Amino acid sequence: MLADSLVGDLGIQLLHFSGPHGSSKEGHTDTMVMLSLQPRIEVYEDGRRVPAAPRLPLLSSAYLSDEIIVEKHFTPERKNYGEREQVTHTLYLYEGEPVRTTWRVAGQRFNGWVREGHLWIVPQSMPHTSSFRGPHGGVMLSFGNSQLERHIGPLMCGGRIELAPKFNLKDGQLAHILHGLEAVAEDGPAADALVGELLVNAACIRLATRHAVSKLKPAPRRGGMPAARLKRVLEYINANLGKNITLFELASVANMSLYYFAVLFRQSTGLSPHKYLLNQRIERSKGLLCDRKRSVLDVGLQVGFEHQNNFARAFRRVMGVSPTEYRRDYL
């Protein structure tokens, strides 16, 4: 399936928050101030719009998109959450020690132990209550109806997707996607928007095909992208390697939905859009590194990497050596 292949092609290393230990107190304070100023995943509770979790997140990716937020939380005590409604659709991937939990939603009551890797799907505007009888935490992904429509709307032919609430769901692919988004969030403002968008696209497709009330069944497409459209996309990529290119931009150039663009692009090139873009950036950078008057930082900026560490990591992943080592040993 597309969701499976997208995650595998991205080649993301799963990162986990290690806390402020070993960092300066000043740096930790700056991080907490930054997190306190970012948009939060929110719920309606007692007529008020409040953060979904009682404490500041350990990690947030609110800068990825206006309507896509990834947060990582840990609450060190037991907690009862009164009746509330999610402002947006929310996925919750539990991380930590098993804890006894109760969840009431849509006239149903669920009791059980929530364990590492269990997923909850909480649809937008659906009243629910929950209680955790001990410390609890995990990764949350929040996305609105407009994002769901953007990623899968063209496949619905005018219909709508209704998500079903799920408790202690086991879905390895969806969990892997959330861990991938967590890794993107770790990069902070230097995060690659195309990677984040591909992962959100994969999450929306997985939800629509596996966890909706009426499951989406996209018609298969074979034969790849029409040659003229593929040519336009490749020319656009080559002309904009120094910019932050999004999946939505590329799909718009091809005049296709996000879903079919990702599918047909891979059929035509053998690569995901992200991997193709990464390879093109590295190829361009190899030529620029021949000019020893250019710094490695400048070369990275010229091919779309705002931070030298990201450029060095991507270059090493493709070439097996850092840009500095490549210039020293191969040029």
Image: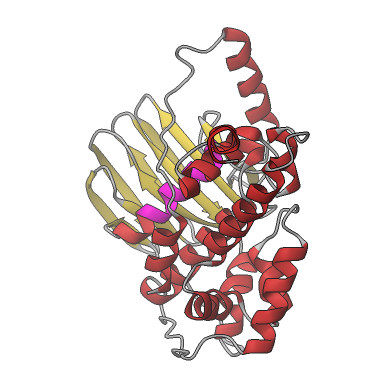
Which x, y percent locates residue 194? 61, 57
User: What's the residue at 71%, 34% (across, down)?
Assistant: 297
Q: Nearer the viewer, residue 131 or 240?
A: 240
Q: Which secondary structure type mostly characterizes the magenta part of the structure?
A: helix
User: What's the residue at 56%, 55% (across, down)?
Assistant: 195
Which x, y percent locates residue 327? 60, 37
Q: Is residue 187 left or right of residue 206?
A: right
Which portion, as a residue range, is magenta? Answer: 176-186
Confirm whether residue 312 shows in the render: yes
Which x, y percent locates residue 291? 74, 41
Q: Is residue 6 left or right of residue 290?
A: left
Which x, y percent locates residue 253? 73, 76
Q: Nearer the viewer, residue 228 or 77?
A: 228
Residue farthest to the top, as pictured: 25
Asked if residue 32 is positioned above or below residue 126 in the image, the reply reads above
Question: The C terminus is located in which quarter?
Answer: top right
Q: Nearer the viewer, residue 318 or 176?
A: 318
Asked if residue 113 is positioned above or below residue 106 in the image, the reply reads above
Q: How is the image coloured?
A: secondary structure
Location of residue 74 (image quadrant) = top left
Asked if residue 10 is positioned above or below residue 188 in the image, the reply reads below
Confirm whether residue 125 shows in the render: no
User: What's the residue at 69%, 43% (across, down)?
Assistant: 290
